[in-house]
Image: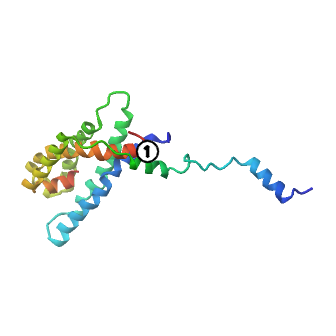
Amino acid sequence: MKPTENELKEMLRQALPPVRQDEDIDLWPRMLRRLDERSAPMGWLDRVLLLLVALGLVAFPAIIPQLLYQL
Amino acid sequence: MNTHPYLRAYLAGIAVPTPMMLCGLTAYVIARYVFDVPIPIERAVVFPLVIVPNAWGLWNVVHFALHGHWQLPIGPHGALLPLLLIPGGYLLARLLGIDFITQNVAWMWAAFPLALAIYYLAWKYLVNFCNHLLGVA
């Protein structure tokens, strides 16, 4: 006796694991949440360091090709 | 998201220098083809395009692998990378005959402290952000 279409569907459902539709599969919402989280602000010492780097590049532009190559 | 942490650390590491390569390559192309600066561009791009991004990825894997053992904060850890990259880049420049690097050794040494500072900041803020994003911070 051949199974009916509904019986076939039921057999397939029992044979296959259920498809998960939570965030275990879709990682994008988790990524968006992390993007929204505020990172720590830059400390004053790091700001000074960044300023010194900028000044160094302006004062010695011949360094720039070296940095572009090495970094 | 506990799978493949080393792969995620590698991807977080290369995510920062890869977009910067576009800026570097654009600068090379403009210098070479617009201003006719005699740069052997085909040889000069090998190091920044191939070695540097992979080095960032692998260095971030090392940082992740050292977690719980002997681990520096990520900023100083990143600042150590130019100590490998700059001599390596110079060696490759000598092998490939890239004159604008090998004939300006004084500028290469002058670039050292700036490179350390740039790497310190880039790793502390950009790579750390990518690590956090990919769950390997």
Q: Is residue B89 visible?
A: yes
Q: Give the mark count.
A: 1
Q: Position of residue A29 (x, y in %)?
A: 49, 51
Kind of element beneath mark 1? helix
Q: Residue at x 30, y 47 (%)?
A: B126
Q: Position of residue B101 (x, y in %)?
A: 14, 54
- The quadrant the C terminus of chain B occupies is top left
Label 1 belongs to which residue? B7
**In the displayed structure image, the side of residue B85 where residue A38 appears, left or right:** right
Chain under numbered label 1: B
Q: Residue at x 20, y 48 (%)?
A: B91
Q: Nearer the viewer, residue B17 or B50?
A: B17
Q: Is residue B97 above or below residue A53?
A: below
Farthest top residue in view = B69
Q: Is residue B112 visible?
A: no
Residue B25 sits in which quadrant? bottom left
Q: Is residue A70 above or below residue B43?
A: above
Q: Position of residue B42 (x, y in %)?
A: 25, 63
**In the displayed structure image, the side of residue A67 where residue A21 appears, left or right:** right
Farthest bottom residue in view = B34
Q: Residue at x 20, y 47 (%)?
A: B118
Q: Position of residue B40 (x, y in %)?
A: 20, 63
What's the colour scheme? rainbow
Residue B66 sits in which quadrant? top left
Q: Is residue A44 above or below residue B23?
A: above
Dot 1 amino acid type: Leu
